[in-house]
Image (tube, rainbow, N blue to C red):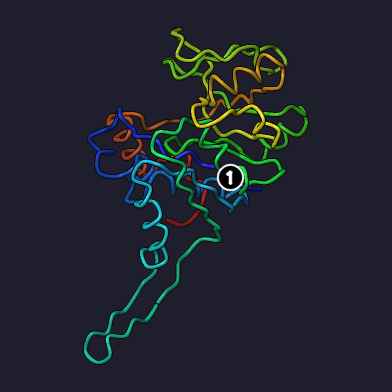
Amino acid sequence: MKVVILAGGYGTRIYEESELIPKPMIEIGGMPIIWHIMKEYSYYGFNDFVICAGYKQHYIKKWFADYYLYSSDICFDLTDDNSIEILQRRTEPWKITVIDTGADTMTGGRIKRVQKYIGNETFMMTYGDGVCDVDIEQLLIFHREKGKLATLTSVIQQQTKGALDINYDNSVRAFREKEFKDSISINAGYMVLEPEVFDYIEGDSTVFETGVLGRLADEGQLMSYTHNGFWQCMDTKIEKLRLEKMWKSGNAPWKKWSKY
């Protein structure tokens, strides 16, 4: 199953970092946050990624092109024939498709642009700026049991990042962007989507959250998988430093893999 990662926005709220590199390439513990997200999915056996790039997309392509060198031990012998010897290979079982979906394309438009790489199959989608310790295997089981077109992961937060009105049966009654409440269920990404969702996207100007999720909720086709564990986005420098502190302290809840 393919995993689509939205990685094309400008990251204006953390511009002191994203001015130079795309937001998903901002590092936590010396590795881009998008790498952390991919390691989460890989832990559960999902290794086929489609990255919706845009702003400064060449940085993403270059980083993955050089990843084999970054992650291996190498001997450069400059004394004779300038040979290169790989001493220890460390890589990932990943297939990575990086697509330039445009600098100004909205979230729905980015997803629509990679439709031909997904095909007519169920796929996962998340944002390239948030980490979580959600059980992705259980998320997929929940989605299949409910039989709807879309399932998102919801978390309780004392902030406003897209408020959800959730029914007792975990269906989403309404999707309201940035409505203030003291404690609300919000969209944390980590979605499972059926290919019919592509039909709800009109073009580059479609905002996935309001234009698509809103319609799916109205039609009773959007489910919420409630996650009571850790989730943290990286919208601001403060949030970036919070994640960095967790990683350095050895208390990074999203890190389920054994190496790195």
The relative height of residue 193 versus residue 158 in the rendered view (above or below) is below
Task: Determine whether 51 is above or below 198 in the image.
Answer: below
Expressed as whole percent of the image width and height from the top left, the position of residue 227 reads 58, 27
Label 1 residue SS: strand
Number of residue marks:
1
Graded by Cα atoms within 10 Å as few (under 14), some (14 to 19) or many (20 or more), the crowding at tag 1 reads many
Does residue 79 appear left or right of residue 168 in this picture?
A: left
Q: Which quadrant would residue 120 be assigned to in this image?
A: top right
Q: Nearer the viewer, residue 52 or 140?
A: 52
Q: Quadrant of the C terminus?
A: bottom left
Relative placement, left or right, of 14 versus 36 is left
Q: Residue at x 46, y 18 (%)?
A: 157
**Front-most of residues 236 and 138:** 236
Q: Can you say whether 173 is above or below 61 in the image?
A: above
Q: Residue at x 39, y 69 (%)?
A: 72
Q: Residue at x 51, y 51 (%)?
A: 257
Instruction: Confirm whether residue 248 shows in the render.
Output: no
* Amino acid under disc 1: Val
Whole-percent x and y of residue 111? 55, 37
| Residue marked by disc 1 | 3
Residue projecting furthest to the bottom? 80
Is residue 111 visible in the rendered structure shown here?
Answer: yes
Q: Is residue 18 left or right of residue 133?
A: left
Could you say where residue 204 lies in the image, as x and y percent from the top left?
50, 32
Q: Residue at x 41, y 16 (%)?
A: 159
- Point out residue 250 in the picture as x, y percentages from the top left corner: 38, 45
In the image, is 214 to the left or to the right of 68?
A: right
Residue pushed farthest top?
181
